[in-house]
Amino acid sequence: MYPSRFHYEAPRTLDEALDLLQAYGDEAKVLAGGQSLIPLIKLRFAAPAAIIDINNISGLDYHEEDSDGSLYVGALCRHRTLERSPLLRSKHPTMSATAPLISDPMVRSRGTLVGSLCHADPQGDWASVMLALGGEIIARSTGGERVIPVSQFVVGPFQNALQPGEIAVRARVPAPRGTRSGTYLKLERRVGDFATVGLAVALETSGGTINRAGLALTGVGPSNIQCTAAEQALAGKTLNASTIDQAARLAAEAAQPKTDVRGSAEFKRHVVYTFVTRALSNPQARAA
């Protein structure tokens, strides 16, 4: 199927892109990696009046820490870059574990973390990771910048909190309170498939005590699910058989799975329990 007709714009500066967005309003779509947008347009699930391709804008393809230890990921930073990042391997274990599990090598070579968050697919892995890490999206318009917590950014299936005229220019992961550890576990039928169940775990500890716990689920609800009760049950505790079991049960209760070709709701809820138990019990998964 051919896409409907649209204007193609390729600005070379962010200011130029923002001016174009303001001119087209909510009839425009921003193209970064295009791994989600292009299939939607080809199938005519989306029919934008204009495509604004930001790939010619320099300075958006970075991931770096600032002086206080916060991590920033630019809008054009590819999954492949994050997959191979020494910075993520050394300091951001949950993100490092996730990057190789994003779709397949072809998608990872072009797709972006920020674009994945904007697409807001309930099966998207990065949204769970950013929920677990307490991440934020920084959006820019001609009126300035706006910081949006990821917990408020994804407002529903394929819906985000961006306003007409805004571009998500980068994502931010706050500096940890203590030693950061964690992992991402994903059950998929084959390589590149959507998650039957995905789990992001991010812990921040000092002296064995959990200062902050982040747990979020992929593929078992209408959107990515933050396991708030399980996080609260872990905060201020040490990991042992009792606290791990409690967190696993609370996370399984938070899941909202449906029976489909990937498995029964009961099976998926059991996988959530198993994944949380495995992630919190495995010292290698917890090692920063």
Image: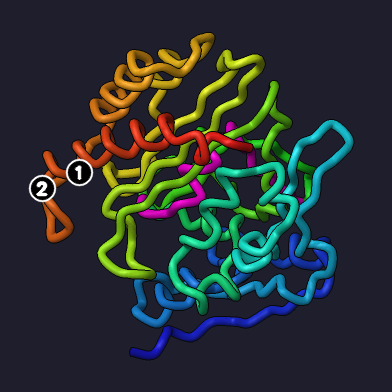
- Vertical side of 192 occupied by 159: above or below: above
**Residue 189 percent location from the top left of the image:** 25, 64
**Residue 3 percent location from the top left of the image:** 42, 85
Q: Say the numbered circle drawn on residue 22.
A: none
The stretch of residues the image draws in magenta is: 122-141
Q: Nearer the viewer, residue 32 or 87?
A: 87
- Vertical side of 111 occupied by 152: above or below: above
Instruction: Kindly indicate whether the residue at mark 1 contacts the one at mark 2 (C-beta within 8 angstroms).
Output: yes
Q: Crowdedness of circle 1 by 10 Å Cα count: few (<14), some, many (20+)?
A: many
- Vertical side of 164 occupied by 226: above or below: above
Residue at the front extreme, as displayed: 283
* Residue type pointed to by label 1: Lys
Q: Which residue is mark 2?
A: 264
> From this viewpoint, is residue 166 visible?
no
Q: Secondary structure at mark 1?
A: helix
| Quarter-of-image position of residue 256 | top left
> On the rendered image, what quadrant is the C terminus found in?
top right
**Residue 154 percent location from the top left of the image:** 47, 43
Q: Which residue is mark 1?
A: 268
* Residue type pointed to by label 2: Ser
Residue occupying the point 52% across, 62% down? 100
**Residue 117 horizontal side relative to residue 13, left or right:** left
Residue occupying the point 45% across, 40% down? 200
Q: Examine the structure image and report whether residue 139 is included in the region drawn in magenta.
A: yes
| Quarter-of-image position of residue 211 | top right
**Residue 257 percent location from the top left of the image:** 20, 41
**Residue 87 horizontal side relative to residue 236, left or right:** right
